[in-house]
């Protein structure tokens, strides 16, 4: 049996049991998606969008779990870590959470399914719905249909996700409502070899929220996660999305984040990729309304023989849009980091202001970075810039720290952290910024000692 036949059989065997199996529109979409996946197969470097990242090995990859984890312990540890980060924050976000008497709204999924016993959604403002996509398909299928998206948008991993996704988060924000504490979405692989998740975020005009999409280290083994997160940001809404990927060292993580922004909508995406054997993040947004703003901000750390790829696209479709894009990579061992970013400015998108930059720090002689920023401009009244750098630690800066009694190891770590800190500093929510900082320090050798020096 070929790898494609395996997934075709999986979809055929599970289709009748998937949530929404009685909805004709969803049945057709899933059938179209698996057909598209069968036609395209796993992408290789022959495809332009995958020229630096091949999934050809998936044709022979046997997915298996070697060691399971206890979900209760993992979730308890995550919440304890966030409370510790909350304790270091001194801003209104901390006061809002303290006044609520908790650490935010927690929605937990285990092995691709909602886990109500581990979740703590808590009280919500009027007009806000946070829960399971599987439940929403049974309760408000029309609203889900409007937000669900297409059958893969031309990419095989996203098509496989559309065909097999059984659950995910469903978030709906009413007009003008602000959810102050973060909404934590936790997706844990505990006992199964693959999970497929689809998250939908729909706002009405003027709504505001901060959403954390977290993939902690779960079951050990060759596991696969496909995830699609769609954000529909209505007029003048503000959505901040932070994704923290820390999956186990042998995991494969294939994800897509899609946003559609109406007039005056503000969308901020922060991608922190610290785990998995291979991690691919396709992030794209369309500024469909005049005066929309977007920030794409990312940090990735890879060592050993790990591979991490961020592939972004920003479509400026209307006038006076503003986009800022910053990605930084820390690459050690024989790791490879890939960044491909495209900014498209349509003919009608006059007075667009767009900037894109990717910087990579090579921490070993065998590490490799590929950066390809792109601008495609059809308007004539724009302000656009892009750039990329690949380099190593500054020897003069290392010498300066050594002369101040900092040993060689920690001098390197201080400079490495300083390079990464600029990305973390763009996370406006102070507790989440501290949470991300702690996750980075865990990745660096002797991070506890380094924290003392900071």
Image: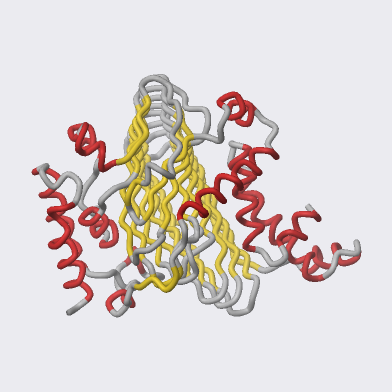
Q: Is residue 180 left or right of residue 57?
A: right
The foreground one among 94 and 327 is 94
Can residue 322 be seen here?
no
- Residue 325 lies, with reference to residue 140, above or below; the image says below
- Residue 291 lies, with reference to residue 314, above or below; the image says above
Q: Is residue 231 left or right of residue 393?
A: left
Query: Looking at the picture, how far across and down is residue 432, in whole percent?
Result: 58, 42
Q: Dividing the image into 4 quarters, which one contains the N terminus?
A: bottom left
Q: Residue at the spot x=19%, y=65% of the render?
A: 10
- Can you tell which quarter of the image residue 366 is in? bottom right
Query: Looking at the picture, how far across and down is residue 101, in whole percent?
Result: 58, 28
Query: Looking at the picture, how far across and down is residue 52, in whole percent?
Result: 41, 70
Q: Residue at the spot x=31%, y=76% of the render?
A: 56
Protein image colouring: secondary structure
The foreground one among 116 and 206 is 116
Q: Residue at the spot x=42%, y=46% of the render?
A: 108
Q: Residue at the spot x=90%, y=61% of the render?
A: 404
Can residue 199 be seen here?
yes
Q: How many marks?
A: 0
Q: Is residue 58 left or right of residue 239?
A: left
Q: Is residue 282 left or right of residue 11?
A: right
The foreground one among 420 and 452 is 452
Query: Looking at the picture, how far across and down is residue 202, in whole percent?
Result: 33, 33
């Amino acid at each position: 049996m070929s790898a494609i036949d395996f997934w075709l059989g999986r979809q055929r065997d599970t289709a009748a049991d998937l949530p929404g199996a009685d909805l004709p529109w969803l049945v057709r979409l899933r059938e179209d998606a698996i057909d598209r996946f069968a036609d395209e197969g796993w992408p290789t470097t022959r495809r332009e969008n995958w020229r630096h990242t091949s999934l050809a090995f998936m044709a022979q990859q046997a997915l298996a779990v070697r060691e399971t984890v206890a979900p209760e312990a993992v979730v308890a540890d995550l919440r304890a870590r966030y409370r510790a980060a909350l304790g270091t924050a001194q801003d209104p976000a901390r006061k809002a959470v303290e006044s609520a008497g908790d650490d935010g709204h927690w929605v937990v999924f285990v092995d691709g399914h909602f886990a109500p016993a581990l979740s703590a959604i808590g009280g919500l403002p009027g007009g806000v719905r946070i829960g399971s996509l599987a439940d929403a398909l049974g309760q408000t299928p029309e609203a889900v249909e409007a937000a669900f998206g297409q059958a893969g948008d031309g990419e095989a991993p996203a098509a496989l996700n559309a065909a097999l996704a059984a659950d995910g988060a469903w978030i709906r924000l009413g007009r003008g409502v602000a959810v102050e504490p973060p909404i934590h979405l936790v997706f844990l692989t505990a006992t199964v070899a693959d999970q497929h998740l689809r998250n939908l975020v729909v706002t009405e005009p003027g709504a505001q929220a901060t959403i954390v999409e977290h993939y902690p280290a779960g079951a050990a083994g060759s596991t696969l996660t496909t995830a699609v997160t769609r954000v529909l940001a209505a007029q003048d809404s503000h959505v901040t999305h932070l994704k923290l990927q820390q999956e186990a060292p042998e995991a494969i993580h294939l994800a897509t984040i899609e946003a559609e922004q109406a007039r005056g909508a503000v969308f901020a995406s922060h991608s922190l990729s610290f785990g998995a054997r291979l991690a691919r993040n396709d992030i794209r947004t369309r500024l469909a309304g005049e005066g929309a703003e977007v920030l794409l901000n990312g940090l990735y750390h890879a060592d050993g023989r790990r591979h991490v790829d961020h592939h972004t696209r920003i479509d400026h479709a209307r006038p006076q849009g503003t986009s800022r894009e910053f990605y930084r990579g820390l690459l050690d061992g024989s790791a490879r980091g890939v960044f491909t970013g495209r900014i498209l400015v349509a003919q009608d998108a006059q007075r667009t202001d767009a900037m894109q930059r990717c910087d990579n720090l090579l921490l070993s002689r065998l590490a490799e970075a590929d950066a390809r920023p792109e601008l495609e401009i059809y308007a004539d009244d724009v302000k656009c810039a892009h750039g990329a750098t690949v380099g190593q630690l500054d020897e003069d800066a290392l010498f300066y720290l050594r002369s101040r009694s900092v040993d060689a190891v920690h001098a390197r770590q201080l400079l490495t952290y300083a390079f990464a800190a600029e990305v973390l500093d763009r996370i406006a929510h102070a507790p989440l910024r501290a949470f991300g900082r702690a996750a980075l320090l865990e990745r660096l050798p002797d991070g506890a000692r380094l924290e003392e020096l900071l």
